[in-house]
Image (spheres, rainbow, N blue to C red):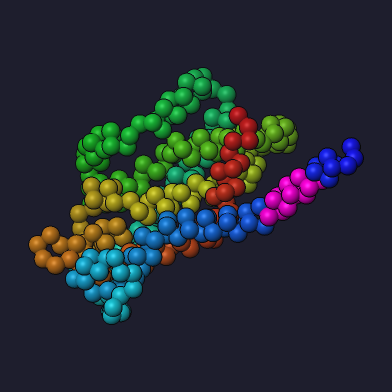
Amino acid sequence: MDGPKAQQYSTIAGTGMQRGTLWRRVKWPLYHILVGALALLMLYPIIWMFFSSFKESRTIFTTATTLLPAEWIWTNYVTGWKGIGGYSFGHYIWNSLVIVVLSTLGVVLSSALIAFGFARLQFVGRTFWFGVMMVTLMLPHDVVLVPQYIIFTKLGWLNTIWPIVVPQFFGAPFFIFLMVQFIRTIPKELDEAATIDGCGKFRLFLQIIMPLIKASLATAAIFSFYWRWEDLLGPVLYLNSPDKYTVSMGLKMFLDSESASNWGGMFAMSMVSLLPVILVFFLFQKHIVEGISSSGIKG
């Protein structure tokens, strides 16, 4: 090809390369701008709550469209920490930590043990019971509230933390499924080698399986921490004494239907209650990603 046609094709090719180079230069800044704008949109409620925690209670909703407070009320954090009902907000945080730690330990250990049984042990009806367990994932939690309440009433557990903590020691279907997927990725030759060396089933679970599924254990612990920390329904149902109230119930006490609600104190303590959640997320976010991304490698 020579002459004008060759020159025309060369011009077209050069134009295409210039456009491609220009798009590559624009693509990454545009991508980051869009992602940043989306992140800002998602974080805006928290940002709004943060600045509202420094506003006077009666002006929070009248100036809702204004982000920055006209006057910074730092005492909202002082009055909020004093709490309501004769107990400081630190007391409610302690109660929540006790429930969260016990519940997380129970659900992680029990779910891991049940998952090991489904993934490694042979017993009659294993497929059937695994299917039943998976069906419970689609069962709304509200369905079992009344039967559970009746059971715990007859056991005399009302106004204690046991109705919230004890059920966690029987495993959670989502965590069981997650850990089953992890265990299935572990070669069974490790089990056979350990058995030859005289390792029993329980020792096999503790010394071989548990260290190899630590990513799924961490993921389950993090999600359990989030769910138990923000739980309001359980404490409202079973806890009646202010000395046993959790963070969620402590925040609810700032709202008074008969007099003026302390919105400033509630928003201030809401920000304080977010600190453990944010800390856990930034410390263990790699485990969340690893646990979710690795759960579907096999099986």
Residue 141 image point, x, y percent: 32, 37
Residue 122 image point, x, y percent: 57, 24
- Vertical arrangement, residue 132 with respect to residue 221, above or below: above
Please indicate whether residue 42 sits to the left or right of residue 191 in the image.
left
Considering depth in this image, is 81 or 195 the residue closer to the camera?
81
Name the image quarter holding residue 188. Answer: top right
Residue 288 image point, x, y percent: 54, 50
Residue 213 image point, x, y percent: 60, 43
Dominant secondary structure of the residues highlighted in magenta in the image: helix
Q: Which residues are magenta?
A: 10-22
**Image point (59%, 43%), residue name:** 293
**Image point (63%, 56%), residue name:** 26
Residue extending furthest toward the front: 4
**Image point (49%, 50%), residue name:** 221
The N terminus - image quarter = top right
- Vertical arrangement, residue 83 with respect to residue 232, above or below: below
Please indicate whether residue 245 sits to the left or right of residue 118 in the image.
left
Residue extending furthest toward the right: 2
Res. 287 in view: yes
The C terminus - image quarter = top right
Asked whether 12 falls inside the magenta stretch, the response is: yes
Considering depth in this image, is 114 or 204 the residue closer to the camera?
114
Asked whether 264 falls inside the magenta stretch, the response is: no
Considering depth in this image, is 97 or 220 the residue closer to the camera?
220
**Image point (84%, 42%), residue name:** 4
Res. 269 in view: no
